[in-house]
Amino acid sequence: MRNRTYTADAAPGDEVTVAGWVHEIRDLGGIAFLILRDKTGQIQIKFEKDDMDEDLVETGLGVSRESVLSVTGTVAEEPRAPTGVEVTPSEVEVIAAADTELPLDPSGKVDAEISTRLNNRTLDLRKPEVKAIFEIRAEIQRAARETFRNHDCTEINTPKIVATGTEGGTELFPITYFGEEAFMNQSPQLFKQLMAGSGLERVFEIGPIFRAEEHNTPRHLNEATSIDFEGAFCDHTEAMDVAEAVVKAAYEAVAENCEAQLEAIGLAEEFEVPDGDFPRLSYEEAIERINATGKLDEQLVWGDDLPTEGEVALGEDVGEHYFITDWPSEIKPFYIMDHEDDEQLSTGFDLMHPRMELVSGGQREHRYEHLIAGFEQQGLDPEAFDYYTKMFKYGMPPHAGFGLGGERLVMTILGLDNIREAVLFPRDRQRLSP
Amino acid sequence: MRNRTYTADAAPGDEVTVAGWVHEIRDLGGIAFLILRDKTGQIQIKFEKDDMDEDLVETGLGVSRESVLSVTGTVAEEPRAPTGVEVTPSEVEVIAAADTELPLDPSGKVDAEISTRLNNRTLDLRKPEVKAIFEIRAEIQRAARETFRNHDCTEINTPKIVATGTEGGTELFPITYFGEEAFMNQSPQLFKQLMAGSGLERVFEIGPIFRAEEHNTPRHLNEATSIDFEGAFCDHTEAMDVAEAVVKAAYEAVAENCEAQLEAIGLAEEFEVPDGDFPRLSYEEAIERINATGKLDEQLVWGDDLPTEGEVALGEDVGEHYFITDWPSEIKPFYIMDHEDDEQLSTGFDLMHPRMELVSGGQREHRYEHLIAGFEQQGLDPEAFDYYTKMFKYGMPPHAGFGLGGERLVMTILGLDNIREAVLFPRDRQRLSP
């Protein structure tokens, strides 16, 4: 709109117009430096007070930090400037003056509480290290989509307003839908399975899911992004292959395409792409190995869910990412298929990271009678899910899939402490706005 | 899972295992043909009854249509077969038998009502011409994302559960959020603007929006996919450039990468990528030209909204896609900026297709006082939008953006009659399930 040259593009000798935010003003008396910041970086604007038009100096140095300025001038080399160049201005325009009191300091000199930061995300995302998280998040989604396409999947969008939840009525947010009761969907599970049985066969979705869980922890959200896969003629081992490919592709894409962002976060040195295959341990092997570490107060027995300390101990033992397979059927949802030769053992799997579960998946029950029995065992009325179950009578192929937590993936890749760091506007029990 | 060779990969001389759905069985007496279908196409399985194991013949020809079979056998050339090859089976396994009565016929020989089709999407999407729509839809989204990235945009995900709607309380679905009243978001408008003011500067989102409109037409949905852009330091002409680039990229991607799908829909011959720049007409010029066509019963006057017949008449005059700019301020939302030299005239624009509006956008009001005044003129309490308005005090750059209807784009590109054809599981006044 203003013949704007991005600050990063300003080269010695150019006459440029750069626009951005006032990051800092250093007034040294006869000379003053204004650092202008935009998404591409920072540039130094030099004011030599005695040699310049008084109005111009006053306009440029009279603004408060985070105001938006447009500066026209000539670029010259200056080794001491942040980018090795500086602009001597011939014209300065204040595009948007900022209040002198800011609720948080984007230069990062003053730390802010997470709640202050979330209340003022616009300012918070002017910090390069925060902006970098969301640029990386976008790159992770791009890489995930590309990987799914390379695995012959079609991207789908399933409805978020639904008549019934995936696993019944708990943990659902109720909506009033033209006078009828409806819910916000807690998972695309049933819809993606319906599509695996369609001519699309292999599908993926990256979209919001909604869970009315009362958890309030650094790793739970009430609205999250789910990365879902479902494939016809797949079993659980192939679903694990796809999950592993997506997670690895995310790391690789970040390593390859987000160098500047890793630098901004301070991870450029230590960032590592996972090496080799992710180990796949059966649940039985997992509890044995956890017990053998001696790090739990009580020994685990068959049927126990794995406690967090157990998962951490196992991670130290086998590597950062590992699958746990062959879970006891009773701890897995009814739509997960059991092994043919042992119905106590499910084909369910989890992809673990020492900090939390990343992926949950398995081969699905595609046999109509078994599925109906599963609903009943779960205490659910199969009639309410008729729209789903009846399709299993019309040639439903064996199929498998998984759900991968989008924010958890960002969080573990970047080592973030709180899942709220990985989402622009988190929703939790206390937070509904902005 | 079963050493499955896709039907499309079966080559003469190969010993293959192919799996898929029974598309058709033609029994000619001594010889019978079973057509097996999967996502890659169809393959002919030949049963020579007298020369083959009786059980094998019985299994293969005894199944009902749409059952899932796995067939192992030898591939041979057969010019009369649909793909030029056929398989003589040595083994046939019924993986999932289908009921003999199907609610709709995926071979497409019997037409079905749209409501029957939507109730049975799994079967409906086994029709190549329906599956093709959703493969094209996925390709359009891929192309849109790539175009936005080429325009320096970062993909974002904004919350769908919100405390206040974009334009107040009408047309919002209410949710109960841990005992508090909340809503499903009708547009990412306010959030994407907050991000244009952040260090990300240029953002896009492709996600669900929810509108409790009572419309029940072939071009309205209550849950739709919105393709949103917002850019700092952009004016409305640059936002139009981006919108035009995205729409054209969608057509180009379909032309380039979806030949088989266009074939399946019957559009391969006639499909055309828009040629040249989209004309940009001012609102004033638009009403003059519509009036000049003489196709309306009453002449339009300044301030009128454009009736559909007017839009169609104009499309015939200027071309399939065209922008209308410089709308009267009073018909555009309060967050759209007026022209600096004429506050009756807004920077709002629409991208029209003769069949419907595709895009709506404009430069946004970034001046705090003007924005607050806008809320008040709209009868909205600015206090309720404090989380949004206060960021305009901290250096909000000029910015512009648009929203593009995801389903409308698919619908106009493919010439679909009903928007429900462009979404897997539509939500409308009558339809909440599946």
Image (spheres, coloured by chain):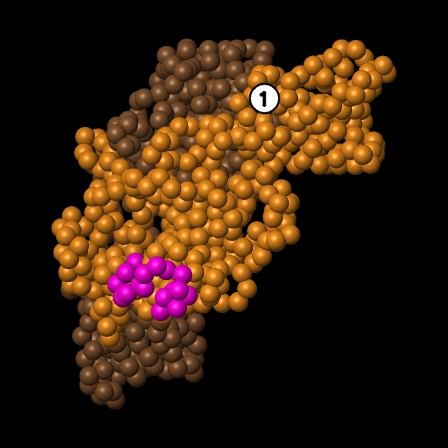
Chain colours: A brown, B orange
Quadrant including the N terminus of chain A: bottom left
| Residue A156 locus on image (x, y percent) | 48, 39
Residue B10: image quadrant is top right
Per the image, the residue denoted by label 1 is: A395
Q: Is residue B298 magenta?
A: yes
Residue A417: image quadrant is top left
- Where B306 sits versus B5, above or below? below
| Residue A300 locus on image (x, y percent) | 41, 15
Between B116 and B333, the residue placed more toward the observer is B116
Q: Residue furthest bottom?
A: A51
The magenta segment? B288-305
Magenta stretch, overall SS = loop
Q: Residue furthest front?
A: B297
Kind of element beneath mark 1: loop
Residue B29: image quadrant is top right
Q: Is residue B78 magenta?
A: no
Q: Chain of mark 1?
A: A
Residue at 42% over, 81% down: A14
- Asked whether the viewer can see residue A212, the reply is no
Residue at 58% over, 57% down: B272
Residue at 18% over, 34% down: B180
Say what amino acid the circle numbered 1 marks: Gly
Residue at 30% over, 58% down: B305
| Residue A102 locus on image (x, y percent) | 18, 59
Mark 1 neighbour class, 10 Å CA radius: few under 14, some 14 to 19, many 20 or more = many
Relative side of B163 to B361, left or right: left
Between A100 and B432, the residue placed more toward the observer is B432
- Where B63 sits versus B427, above or below? above
